[in-house]
Image (spheres, grey):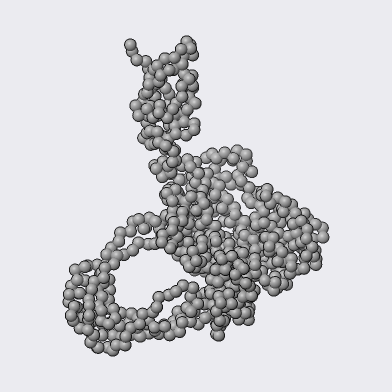
Amino acid sequence: MRLVIAEKPSVAQSIAAVLNAKKRHDGYLEGSGYLVSWCFGHLAELADAAAYNADYAKWTMKDLPIVPMNYRFTIREDKRKQFDILRGLLRREDVSEVVNACDAGREGELIFRTVYCLAGCSKPILRLWISSMEDDAIHAGFKQLKSGRNYDGLHQSALCRAKADWLVGINATRYFSLTYGRTLNIGRVMSPTLALLVQREADISAFVPEPFYTVQLDCGFIAATDRMKDRKTADGIVNACKGKTATVKSVERKEKAEKAPALYDLTALQRDANRILGYTAQQTLDYLQALYEKKLCTYPRTDSRFLTEDMEDSINDLVSSAAAVCGVASPTTIHAKQVCNNKKVTDHHAIVPTVSAGKTDLMSLPLGEREVLKLAAKGLLRAISEAHRYAETVITVECAGHSFTAKGKTVLVPGWKSYEQEQTEAASTLPDVAEHQPISVSDAAVKTGKTTPPKHFTEDTLLSAMESAGKEDMPDDAEREGIGTPATRSGIIEKLVSSGFVERKKSKKVVNLLPTSTGTALITVLPEQLQSPQLTAEWEHRLKEIERGEIVPDSFMDGITAMLGELMQTYNPIPGAEVLFPSGREIVGKCPRCKADVTETPKGFFCENRACSFALWKNSKFFTAKKKTLTKTLAATLLIDGRAPLKGCYSEKTGKTYDAVVVLEDDGTKTAYRLEFERR
């Protein structure tokens, strides 16, 4: 008996149908020598710090860094029942082999192996590795099951990634939260991404626009000078050219070609879906995952933009399906070889619609799924098309000793651009002219422009920046570059938004990603190690090396631990944190020690400067003994004048009340009060 474990119930049901496992049980299906069950994503997760030591429930500096000797996983309570079912199945005596049918990637491997290990299973593992949920692909996958040992490196890579994220998240979050008196969520890949956004806004703020000028001649077509900085020079050229005749100095005509773009990987598809359709990266991934489970597109979490060479024979059917999805005629010529390259396919090939997609009633799909599927289909149609060919004409004219240039373009063969999603501007054409031909100038004018600052990040451009971050410092043959992976980048963006570090702001038709004041403040205080895209890219590269068995996991984890230890020993807090991280509480007055703001909390009045310990406690025995309350008004007067009238004080000796003046005394370390009485 073989036990098959899928990542989700819907995937398990598709596999069970192919295997003819039709008998339903609680949490699994059975039939034809197979048991088919499922996880609900991650059934288990790394335990919180308090699981190692109850004292860790309270955040203190003395406990940092927290580095477990042996990492523990805990079962999520809402998924406990399914885990118990899987554990029972894994321990059944009639189960001889276990098939890992979780998503064919790093996270899928971790999901399966965690359950397998927690159940105490040691039975042989077989790996189902497929890029499509179509029946034929599942059949073929079960005929080519591979030993689970082949994926031990992938599991170790996934486990190291999870441990590294835990180490940085637990320790850095606690350290900086305690340092600055506010909860600051810090992530191994989240913080470098935030740093990109903050740096971009800094570049925009620092940008000073500079004017520039060009002179344009109207001689039946528009010819212009190069940019110049001096307006007087431009005006001089205009005056010199008005009423004059220009001469054609040269006419150059070149035929050019633009190769078809590669197929979509996840990041490229997310970028276009954001730019063209306005979807967030997470929305696009969710739509793709749904399409994958409905057998309408191939595996979404891929970083490859090519198909394998053994798929060349099926290209025609895939293209016909894509054409049907787009509602266009199938192209007469298909350049299959330009999309098939084994050397450029890693774990999974590019994202393309399946053959089943062309037979589906698209109107039955939700709008988002339908639009993303059409986008993927057009990606395939473009990729197998011939090059876009055009003729570029450059005319250079001379007038009054000055040179002017005009460029025109004539489309010769539309090629792949006939499947462009967006409307492109009509190509400008130039009239036929000959060298040395005189041309009358009907007008000459100065056109003024300004240099423009960098643009705010959108999800499209941020994904691109994350993908290429640190690239210049990586080896040329590095398989994994940038911040995060195609599978994780959308989640990073969403976490930044949900944590309050980034916000989405619509400007005209574009939604920009902007760091909040808290996000900017966080990057201001974070050391380079935690915000460096280069370092994060290096870590991703090393995780890939672990997967290939080129380095041992301990060396990677030791590097993370050493980095955290050094950080906590050498980091110097940034002064003025009360300005960077304001509490948002009402200001009562100024601190007599450091002149920072004093604000009210339920327990008292405290200095906002985390390095200062000044406090006026509401439960002070001095006031309670006199049956008086330290009110906000009283605290404010004490902070301004150092003294305040206190009427109706209760005397424990006499049981009577009296009036006095309370004086605040502070020696820089301790705060006390004393009473003064007016002389009569």
Res. 99 image quadrant: bottom right
Query: Left of 405 or right of it: where is 61?
Result: right
Q: Identify the residue at the far right of this view.
A: 94
Visible in this render: residue 536? Answer: yes
Q: Quadrant of the C terminus?
A: top left
Compared to 350, does 209 lie above or below? above
Residue 299 visible in the picture = no
> Residue 529's spot in the image, x, y percent?
47, 53
Across and down, in percent, residue 347 comes to 61, 68
Determine the image quadrant of residue 326. bottom right
Give me the residue at 30% from left, 79% from top: 406
In this view, the residue in front, 381 or 209, is 381
Q: Position of residue 586 (x, y in %)?
A: 42, 37
Up/down of 516 relative to 382, above or below: above
Residue plotted at (61% across, 61% down): 106
In the image, is residue 76 above or below residue 132?
above
Task: Tell which of 417 and 611 is nearer to you.
Answer: 417
Residue at position x 31%, y 88% in the image: 432
Picture quadrant of residue 232 = bottom left
* Residue 244, above or below 622: below
